[in-house]
Image (cartoon, rainbow, N blue to C red):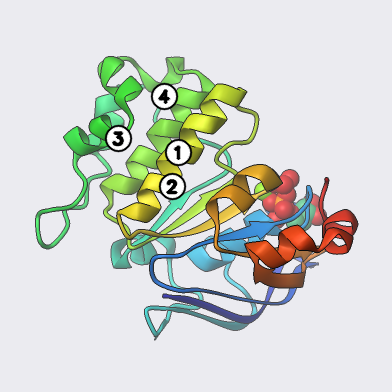
Amino acid sequence: MLEVENIHTYYDLSHILFKVSLEVSKGEIVCLLGRNGAGKSTTMRSIMGLTPPREGVIRFKGEDITGQKPYLNARRGIGYVPDNRRVFADLTVGENLEISERKSQDGKGWNKERVYDFFPPLKEIDSRKAGFLSGGEQQMLTIGRALMTNPELLLLDEPTEGLAPLMVKMLEEQIARLRDTGLTVLLAEQNQQVALGLSSRAYVIDNGVIRYHGTIGELKADEAVRKKYLLI
Ligand SMILES: Nc1ncnc2c1ncn2[C@@H]1O[C@H](COP(=O)(O)OP(=O)(O)OP(=O)(O)O)[C@@H](O)[C@H]1O
Ligand SMILES: [Mg+2]
C-alpha cells in the first residue's frame, strides 16, 4: 500500500531525514518509533506532501506520489492526523466532521453517524464549538475528521501524546477496531506500550535514520535496540 524508498528530507538547509525507507502493506498497523526530534513527524509530512523529500521515492498503491500536493494525496485516499490536533475552533464538532466528508464510492464508508457510533463521546458534544474541547475530545475529533475522508491509509502522528491514561486506553481500543475494519495505519509514537500493543511491525528512527525494523515480537525481545534508541 505504501512504499517509502530512500528519502532525504530537509527544512531549508537542515538535512533531517537520511535515506529513510519503510513499507506498509494493506491492512497492517505499522509503527514508527523514536524519541523526541528523531524524525517521526517529518516522515509523516514527507509522505503527505507537506514537506516533500528532495531525494527518494514514495509510492501509494503502486503509484509514484513523491512531491504530490497534500490535497491530492488526501483525495487519493491518504488520511492524515497531524500531531497538533488542530480543529476549526469556531465550528461545532458536527460541522468539523461535515466539512471533511469525502463520500466513499460504494456509499458504505464513513459518515457522521458512523463516526459518532465509533466515538460515542463526540455525539454528546455534537453542537459544542470545537475550541472548547478537552485534549482527548479534540483527538477523537481529528481522527473522526480523517475518517470522514474515507481513507485507505491513515497516518497517525502520536495520537495518545499528553492524554490521560483512560483516554489513551480508549484510543488504543478504537485504533485496534480501525484495523479490524481493514484500514491500513502508519502510527508514529514515542509511547512504546501503545505502539507495541497495536502494531504488527515496527521501524525505529533516530536522528533521521531508520536504525531497526522487525516484527513486534523481535523488537520486544531486543532490549539493546530499545535501550539505545527508545525510552524504556
Ligand atoms: N519546521 C522546522 N524547521 C526546522 N527544523 C525542524 C522543523 N520541524 C522539525 N524540525 C527538526 O527536525 C528534526 C525532526 O523533527 P520531527 O518533528 O520530525 O521529530 P519527531 O520524531 O516527530 O519528534 P516529536 O516526538 O517531538 O514529535 C528535529 O531536530 C527538529 O528540531
Ligand atoms: Mg512529532
Give the Cα separation between the discs numbered 2 and 3: 12 Å
Task: Tell me the number on the disc at residue 176.
Answer: 2
Question: Mark 3 or mark 4, which is nearer the start of the sequence?
Answer: 4
**Res 115 quadrant in image:** top left
Q: Is residue 163 above or below residue 32?
A: above
* Labelled pair 3, 1 in contact (Cβ < 8 Å): no
Q: Amino acid at mark 4?
A: Ala
The total of numbered circles placed on residues is: 4
* Residue 45 percent across, percent down from the top left: 57, 60
Residue at coordinates 24% horizontally, 31% vertically from top-left? 117
Q: Residue at x 22, y 45 (%)?
A: 101
Which mark's residue is nearer the viewer, 4 or 1? 1
Foreground label between 4 and 3: 3
Q: Amino acid at mark 1?
A: Glu
Residue nearer the viewer, 111 or 11: 111
According to the image, label 3 marks what residue?
A: 118
Q: Are marks 4 and 3 in contact (CB under 8 Å)?
A: no
The residue carrying pointer 2 sits among few (fewer than 14), some (14 to 19) or many (20 or more) residues within 10 Å by Cα, namely some
Q: CA distance from mark 2 to mark 1?
A: 5 Å
Quickly name the residue at label 1: 173
User: Contact (CB < 8 A) between labels 2 and 4?
Assistant: no
Q: Position of residue 89 (x, y in %)?
A: 41, 24
- How far apart, in angstroms, are the residues tagged by discs 2 and 4? 28 Å
Of 219 and 116, nearer the camera is: 219
Q: Are marks 2 and 1 in contact (CB under 8 Å)?
A: yes
What is the secondary structure assignment of the residue under circle 3? helix
Mark 4 crowd level (few <14, some 14–19, many ≥20, 10 Å Cα): some
Residue 89 is labelled as 4
Q: Disc 3 to disc 1, how far (Cα)?
A: 11 Å
Q: Element under label 4?
A: loop
- SS of the residue under disc 1: helix
